[in-house]
Amino acid sequence: MIPNTAKAALSNNKSLFGCWIQLFNPAVAEMMGLCGYDILMIDMEHGLGSVVDAANVMRAARGTGAASLIRLPANDPVIIKTLMDQGADGIMVPMVETPEAAQAVVSACRYPPKGVRGLAVGIARGSDYGINERYVDTVDDHTLVICQIETVLGVKNAKAIAEIDGVDMLFIGRNDLAADSGHILDLDHPEVNALVDEVLAVAKAAGKKIGTVPSAGRSWQKLLDEGFDLVIPSSDISILRMFGQQEVASYRAHIGAEQAKGSIAKGY
């Protein structure tokens, strides 16, 4: 197998910097990987792509050095099985609220007797279509399993979730956590920050990795300094949007200045 660079880095206590992939365009994903992001988080929860699209994005990313992780639309063993077969370096499941749900995630990623994943190694892209004869024995060591903590109940059960064998990381969904705690869009509300800090402490105590997204008050730099192992500040969509807005604003400012000069020259 091609080594999972993200899991290897985390094992060596290195932090990771990621980019959300929501356009599901292989060329864009390849470019983001070549930019140097450690991981590409292929977003099937809020993005526009199918399983086929996700597989093509993973193909595009394969030679860039970036690991391909997938955020699922739901905690569904059928979808997990399919994406594992397609060679995901890791999966992230949203809205994990109980240790039972976390155990279901891990079980869906693992072959019997450790799990319930269906066996089709002869045709799976993950096993190089059956060419990799050691795939079954090594895939667990190469797979990063992430549970998202996005509700107050999830925070309450974070310790039990972190203690599940096979859960590698807790990832705090700040937007949904703020909404669920009664502070929608206020990611830096003191109550939200307290919940974030609680999950951070739980993950560290359990020896598990921790990730999240930045906010106005807690930049990605600050989060890394606080001990977070993975931050994902931007998406392919937001990067295009922000640069487009900046360039158009510069253009309009320039045109406005030129028009003002013309008005002054004419004595208006």
Image: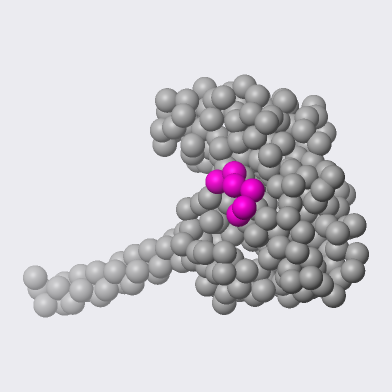
> For residue 204, which quarter of the picture?
top right
User: Is 17 on the left-hand or right-hand side of 256?
Assistant: right
Residue 241 among those drawn in magenta: no
Instruction: Residue at 83% x, 43% y: name it.
Output: 114
Residue situated in front as seen by the camera: 111 or 263:
111
What colour scheme was applied to this rendering of the protein? one colour
* Quadrant where the C terminus is found in the figure: bottom left
Give x and y (percent) for residue 228.
71, 40
* Quadrant where the N terminus is found in the figure: bottom right
> For residue 174, which quarter of the picture?
top right
Residue 75 among those drawn in magenta: yes
Give the magenta-colored segment's residue range.
Answer: 74-79
Give x and y (percent) for residue 51.
57, 64
On the question of residue 65 being in view, the answer is no
Instruction: Residue at 57% x, 24% y: name it.
Output: 153
On the question of residue 120 being in view, the answer is yes
Residue 7 to residue 251: above or below: above
